[in-house]
Image: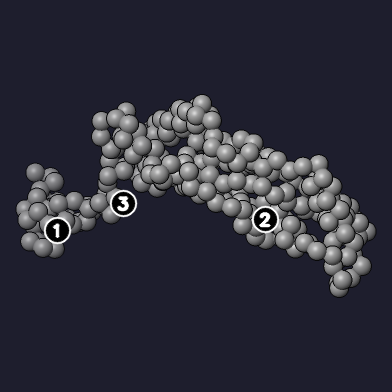
């Protein structure tokens, strides 16, 4: 499995307050002290890591505000993408009048947040620890993902039948069709996958065979009158 370590960004107090602060104002030093105390308290309790597994071919990204960002890499031909979360993240809750209380977020809570955001795809799950996932958990996620592909594919079929417009089809739905085609659950890729937006707006001239705009009345290659051809 491909893996990625957490790369905190934004106002992540894990990286901002890593050692005692000697400068800054009174409120800055107070916040620094509270965060350090909360981190030590949680570390004394023991921090159990968590791993998020991604079976999708796109990365999972989530912005947690003061807690920074998380991103799980996509799956590839080598296998699922995964990210081990091994550290706590700490933010501060403003109580007013320059009073703050630290809020520690454990690895499993961060993992749950990612699954909450992307769990509808079926191909995302988490487990405690950093070892390899249980085969049963992987198999269940794969089946759930297939169910999501079927659902997205059917939504696209319905939208295309009703509107016949590419803008009504999402990239996720095109991906779902490709995956179902690989599994031989559909006989061929639908036109909303193989036909590009540009291709949808063009057609071949019946006289010279050149590609022209679908709305053209006269072929600018051979000057064939398409309106007459259409009427005839």
Apparent side of residue 132 relative to residue 213 in the rendered image (left or right): right
Q: CA distance from mark 1 to mark 3?
A: 22 Å
Disc with the residue nearer the chain's start (1 vs 3): 3
Q: Kindly identify which numbered label has been placed on residue 229.
A: none
Residue 210 in percent (x, y) is at 12, 57
Q: For the point 85% across and 67% down, which residue is it?
A: 21
229 relative to 121, above or below = below
Measured as percent of width and height from the top left, residue 221 is found at: 10, 63
- Give neighbour class at mark 1: few <14, some 14-19, many 20+ (Cα, 10 Å): some
Left or right of 59, for residue 99: right
Q: CA distance from mark 3 to mark 2?
A: 37 Å
Q: In front of the other: label 1 or label 3?
A: 3
- Decide which of tag 3 and tag 2 comes sooner along the chain: 2
Q: Secondary structure at mark 2?
A: loop
* Left or right: 184 as drawn, with respect to 112: left
Residue where numbered disc 1 is placed: 218
Q: Which mark is residue 68?
A: 2
Residue at 81% x, 51% y is 39
Quarter of the image that includes the C terminus: top left
Task: Kindly identify which residue carries mark 3.
Answer: 197
Number of the front mark, 2 or 1: 2
- Which is in the foreground here, disc 3 or disc 2? 2
Front residue of this view, candidates 140 and 187: 140
Question: Going 76% across and 52% down the picture, which residue do you hit?
Answer: 90
- Nearest the viewer among 13 and 19 is 19
Q: Estimate the x, y position of residue 24 in percent, counting from the top left.
A: 86, 72
């Amino acid at each position: 499995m491909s893996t990625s370590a957490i790369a905190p960004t934004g106002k992540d107090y894990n990286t901002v307050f890593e050692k005692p602060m000697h400068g800054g104002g009174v409120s800055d030093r107070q916040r620094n002290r509270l965060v350090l105390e909360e981190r030590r308290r949680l570390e004394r309790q023991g921090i159990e890591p968590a791993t998020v597994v991604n079976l999708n071919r796109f990365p999972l990204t989530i912005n947690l505000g003061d807690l920074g960002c998380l991103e799980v890499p996509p799956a590839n031909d080598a296998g699922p993408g995964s990210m081990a979360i091994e550290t706590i993240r700490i933010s501060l809750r403003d109580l007013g009048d320059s009073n703050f209380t630290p809020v520690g977020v454990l690895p499993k809570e961060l993992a749950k947040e990612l699954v909450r955001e992307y769990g509808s795809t079926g191909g995302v799950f988490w487990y405690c620890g950093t070892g390899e996932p249980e085969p049963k958990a992987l198999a269940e996620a794969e089946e759930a993902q297939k169910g999501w592909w079927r659902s997205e594919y059917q939504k696209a079929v319905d939208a295309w039948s009703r509107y016949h417009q590419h803008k009504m089809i999402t990239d996720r739905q095109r991906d779902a069709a490709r995956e179902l085609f690989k599994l031989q659950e559909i006989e061929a890729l639908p036109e909303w996958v193989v036909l590009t937006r540009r291709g949808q707006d063009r057609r071949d001239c019946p006289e010279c065979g050149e590609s022209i705009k679908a709305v053209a009345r006269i072929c600018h290659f051979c000057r064939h009158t398409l309106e007459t051809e259409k009427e005839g």
